[in-house]
Image: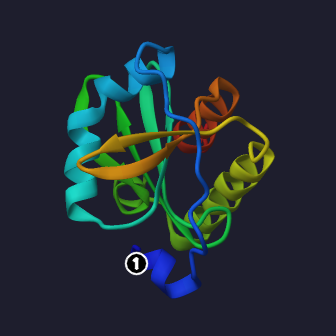
Amino acid sequence: MGFFSKLFGGGAEKEYPALDAASSAGQSLEKFRPQLETLIKKIDDKYEVVPSAKALYTFLGNPPGMFGMVWFLENDPAEHNMKSLMAKKGFGQKKIDTIMIKLREAYTEAEAEARFSAEAAGKKIIVIPSEVLAEKLYKILHTMDE
């Protein structure tokens, strides 16, 4: 159980069917596996990932309640999070709070989407193979200042 889960109670883990490694979501997950496994080894928490062709978005903790967000971009080995976004874009806490509200809304709107399980760095993760959710996350995180 991770940091956010310990603070706010994670409850029983729900079981999901295994992700097909040959699916587009499985292939996208593989593309970002090295970065994801590095993150998992660093932060012990519950992971829900949204793979896409250009990015891997990772909810940590207990979304839509208390959660963190980390993402990895294609052709960019760096780990991106709210702190790095603040530094890169010069955002203040109020702007980050607005972004977090939008992320929570996007996650909530996708709660009916299919979920699958996979493993990374010896840890079970939840995979949400939703292009609609991935597109919403992209817009929230990459175009919020336009």
In the image, 125 versus 53, the foreground residue is: 125
Q: Amino acid at mark 1?
A: Phe
The residue lying at 28 percent from left, 47 percent from top is 79
Quadrant including the N terminus: bottom left
Q: Tell me residue 127's x, y (percent).
A: 52, 39
In the image, 97 versus 57, the foreground residue is: 57
Q: Which residue has dot 1 on it? A: 3
Q: Tell me residue 77's x, y (percent).
A: 21, 35
In the image, 128 versus 22, the foreground residue is: 22
Which quadrant would residue 82 be assigned to in this image? bottom left
Q: Is residue 121 left or right of residue 141?
A: left
Quadrant including the C terminus: top right
Element type at marker 1? Answer: helix
Q: Is residue 73 above or below residue 89?
A: above
Which quadrant would residue 16 be assigned to in this image? top right
Q: Tell me residue 122's x, y (percent).
A: 25, 50
Q: Tell me residue 107's x, y (percent).
A: 69, 50
Total numbered circles: 1
Q: Residues within 10 Å of mark 1 (few under 14, many from 20)?
A: some
The residue lying at 36 percent from left, 31 percent from top is 73
The residue lying at 23 percent from left, 48 percent from top is 121
Q: Is residue 79 left or right of residue 69?
A: left
